[in-house]
Each structure stands twice: as structure tokens, then as C-alpha cells.
Amino acid sequence: MHSLWCTPLGVHRFARSADINPLLVRVFRTMRATDGQARPDAPFYASRDDLLQRIRLPEWEQLVRFIVDSLHQTVVLANQAVWPEATPGLQIALRGIWFQVANRGSHHDVHTHGNCSWSGVYCVQVDEPAQRQAHRLLGATNGVTRFYGPHFNHLGGAHMDFGNAYLQAAHIDVDPLPGQLVVFPSWLPHQAMPYDGEADRIIVSFNASVHAAGGSDQLHGYSHA
């Protein structure tokens, strides 16, 4: 029996989130308010993906370091069976990092991310779990990130019977929890389900590529020896 082509998903907790997240909320609100292209009353907002160049705060640098370290851990575990034993240090390039604000039923439809191998979602702010899940229409799916398995599209073609019941749980919902980072392969289809709450749902998202040390890519200054 061989279980082939598993889908790795890394879940990490930022130890300093309680101290740093409130500051990030204020920074992101200021950036949104000063964005001349944004409607201040819109239920959804996404920043440009150049936050590495735009934010210069030690607290932000701590979050970026946490993201890179968590990504490194996930990538190593996902590839340990296929990398050469003497794999040198890695170079991790954050190709884009941005924040999103959502409320009043807004959502982000099913999509994947291109030009990278890994992506991630870090939760900055959202309603408390009991309050979020008690929404009279959205219930437990209020604001979750939903990931769809690679076999999901085949189920729509009626490739279903009692013999492949193991495939029929075709998606998984990950609750938004402040301080939680979810790292996932960029090809994995996912969506942010509709959210409505007292507090805005604020997340930080990123795309990253990973290379062996000594690669020729133009990289940011975050690496592991």
C-alpha cells in the first residue's frame, strides 16, 4: 500500500502576535486610508504586494522573520524524502507580501497563486471564534480559508462511488485565528469564505520561491545557512 502525492500544509503560531498584531492593524488602517485609489467604505480592500519595501518597523521585521522561518520548516519537512541527503542551505525569496481587509459578506473566490512554489496566510485580526461562528447565516464557515484537494474537480465528473469514499472529503476549512500562519503549496486551490463580523478580518498573504544556496535569483535578505 502506497499513499501517493500527499498535499503538505504547515500551521504555525507566532508567539508575539498579541503584542504585534494590534500595531499592524493600526499600520494597515493608515495605509488604506492614505491610498488614493481605495474607497474607505468598501467591504474589501487589498494592498499592493510590496509591503517589504514600504514598511520599516522592527515589529514588522519580526513577523517577516517568523514567516520565513515557518516556511523553511514546512519546506524541509515536505521535501525531506526527495531532496539529496547533502542538500545545502536554502535561499527563500518573498516574491510578494500584502494585506487584505474584509467584512460585510465580502470574500475571495477560488484561486491559485502563480510564479512561486509556496504561499501563506497570516491572520492579524478577526472576531473571536464563538462570535464568528454564531453568525445566523454564515455559521461555522464565516471567514474561514477553504482549501480544495487536487482531486476536487474529478468529483464533479461523477467519479464517485462507495469504493472511493476516502476522496469525498474534498476540501478542508481552516479557521482564522489571530497569530496563526498557514503555509501551503501555491498550486493548491483555495478561497476566503464570506465574512461578516464586528471586527474586520485582516490577513497578511505572501508568495515565495525556494532555491538551493548559491542560486542566481535576485533574493531578499532572508535566508537559512
Image (cartoon, grey):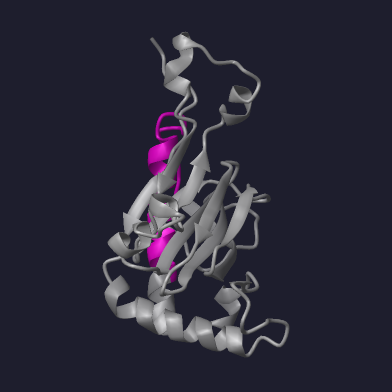
* Front residue (pair 134, 202): 134
Q: As drawn, is 137 to the left or to the right of 108?
A: left
* Residue 179 appears in the picture as rendered: yes
| Residue 38 placement: quadrant | bottom right
Residue 45 to residue 205: above or below: below
Main SS category, magenta section: helix
Residue 16 percent location from the top left of the image? 28, 72
| Residue 136 placement: quadrant | bottom left
Residue 80 part of the magenta segment: yes
Residue 146 percent location from the top left of the image? 49, 46
Q: As drawn, is 15 to the left or to the right of 8?
A: left
Residue 211 percent location from the top left of the image? 56, 49
* Residue 210 appears in the picture as rendered: no
Q: Residue at x 67, y 82 (%)?
A: 39
Instruction: Report the magenta residues as a range.
Output: 64-89
Q: Residue at x 35, y 57 (%)?
A: 133
In which quadrant of the rendered image does the C terminus lie?
bottom left
In which quadrant of the rendered image does the N terminus lie?
top left
Q: As drawn, is 63 to the left or to the right of 102?
A: left
Residue 206 percent location from the top left of the image? 54, 61
Residue 46 part of the magenta segment: no
